[in-house]
């Protein structure tokens, strides 16, 4: 990332790419949320708003009339014009419904249950590679591989291309936030990769998600346009990998730095489902955005047409007005209606897959390596998805 002037005032000059935000955004959200105006604004990014209360974030997420999903990332430069976006996440009503409905069957709980043996096998193969070494990087050696290999299996593409996937994600979601050339390069390379696979499935169909999308139809019976298929494939790869590996990595970082929670969870795996929900709440990786389509007012703040709004679901999950002891990680928290998977019509289609991958990944790690701790400084990603990029740990 290029050098940026530091944020001077989080209420009037916020910047989610500032190193202080990347390292520890929680005090920043608290500062804004407790101020007289809990919706911050910045002239950066061509003008952007930042709500921090659950109530305000929810109101925006449920209002597609005033807040469009044509742009879903706050970045220095506009997204590539060509390519058809990434439906359904970049679609507004009424086009959104058809794009979303076609994705529901492959991600039902029943469909995802069939992938559990594959996920468990992937996790144990990865653990086999470092279990005897006494140390590993829980992000680089483990978390970053699991969703790559599972989504590759679903799409019917080689998981040996994992390094390419990680490169494109870095180009699009991290470097591309400030570097237009990196964004367009990653976007183009990923598109052409899927175009080749799409053409191959038309010639020789398979039992995979690419074939399923190639054969998908709009409600009027017409097949999906090529740009629609390519956009959805880009979404499935990028959204299906970075978000989940970030959530897995954050969960393992927490357990490496909170010995009591680690020991308790290792001793009682029945707590795993509630622990996963709490990790999702406390370390929610995804921050989306909206484009103000029509001027409107929420909580006394006027949102001007043409500017951006960042929707920090992680900040909503830390709102003490909604979650008691919001800044505490309570692995047996009983009521936990978090917003980690978003709110409104764009709530994550892949939530069942993400939950399964997290549960299997954390559970298998604790089963094989119940005793571990942080062995150095963890580093965190920058941009729309927050998660640890390095989590060095030592066993025992």
Image: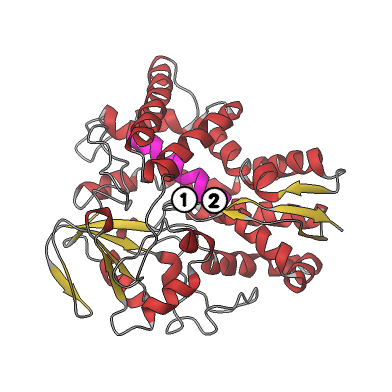
Q: List x then y, in percent, for residue 347.
A: 38, 58
- Determine the image quadrant of residue 176: top left
Using the rendered image of the protein, determine whether residue 216 is visible from the camera's viewpoint. no
Q: Is residue 233 magenta?
A: yes
Residue at figure coordinates x 58%, y 70% from the top left: 278
Disc 1 element? loop
Disc sitting over residue 109 in the figure: none
Q: Which residue is mark 2?
A: 244
Answer above or below: position of 216 versus 17: above
Q: How many residues crowd around disc 1 within 10 Å: few (fewer than 14), some, or many (20 or more)?
A: many
- Crowding at label 2, few (<14), some or many (≥20) Cα neighbours within 10 Å? many
Cβ atoms under marks 1 and 2 closer than 8 Å: no
Which residue bears the numbered disc 1?
350
Give the residue drawn at x 75%, y 38%.
125
Task: Locate the C terminus and report the quarter of the image it occupies.
Answer: bottom right
In three-dimensional space, the C-alpha distance between marks 1 and 2, rounded to whole angstroms, equals 10 Å
Vertical position of residue 240 compared to residue 336: above or below: above
**What's the residue at 52%, 68% (across, down)?**
281
């Amino acid at each position: 990332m290029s050098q940026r002037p530091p944020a001077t005032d989080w209420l009037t000059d916020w910047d989610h790419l500032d190193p202080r935000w990347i390292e520890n955004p929680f005090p920043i959200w608290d500062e804004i949320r407790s101020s007289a105006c809990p919706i911050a604004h910045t002239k950066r990014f061509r003008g952007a708003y930042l709500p921090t209360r659950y109530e305000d974030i929810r109101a925006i997420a449920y209002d597609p009339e005033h807040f469009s999903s044509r742009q879903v990332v706050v970045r220095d430069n506009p997204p590539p014009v060509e390519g058809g976006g990434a439906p359904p996440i970049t679609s507004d009503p009424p086009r959104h419904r058809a794009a979303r409905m076609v994705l529901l069957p492959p991600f039902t709980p029943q469909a995802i249950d069939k992938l559990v043996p594959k996920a468990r096998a992937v996790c144990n193969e990865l653990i086999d590679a470092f279990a005897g070494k006494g140390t590993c990087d829980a992000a680089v050696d483990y978390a970053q591989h699991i969703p790559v290999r599972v989504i590759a299996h679903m799409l019917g593409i080689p998981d040996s291309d994992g390094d390419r996937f990680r490169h494109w994600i870095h180009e699009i979601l991290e470097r591309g936030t400030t570097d237009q050339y990196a964004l367009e390069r990653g976007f183009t390379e990923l598109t052409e990769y899927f175009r080749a696979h799409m053409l191959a499935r038309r010639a020789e169909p398979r039992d995979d998600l690419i074939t399923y999308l190639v054969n998908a139809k709009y409600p009027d019976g017409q097949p999906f346009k090529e740009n629609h298929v390519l956009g959805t494939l880009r979404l499935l790869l990028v959204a299906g990998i970075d978000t989940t590996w970030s959530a897995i990595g954050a969960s393992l970082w927490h357990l490496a730095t909170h010995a009591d929670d680690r020991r308790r969870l290792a001793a009682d795996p029945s707590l795993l489902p509630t622990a996963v929900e709490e990790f999702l709440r406390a370390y929610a990786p995804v921050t989306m955005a909206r484009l103000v389509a029509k001027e409107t007012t929420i909580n006394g703040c006027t949102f001007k047409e043409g500017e951006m709004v960042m929707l920090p679901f992680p900040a909503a999950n830390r709102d003490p007005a909604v979650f008691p002891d919001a800044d505490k990680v309570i692995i047996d928290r009983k009521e936990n209606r978090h917003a980690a998977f978003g709110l409104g019509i764009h709530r994550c289609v892949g939530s069942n897959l993400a939950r399964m991958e997290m549960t299997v990944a954390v559970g298998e790690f604790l089963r094989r390596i119940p005793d571990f701790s942080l062995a150095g400084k963890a580093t965190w990603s920058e941009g729309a998805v927050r998660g640890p990029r390095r989590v060095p740990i030592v066993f025992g």
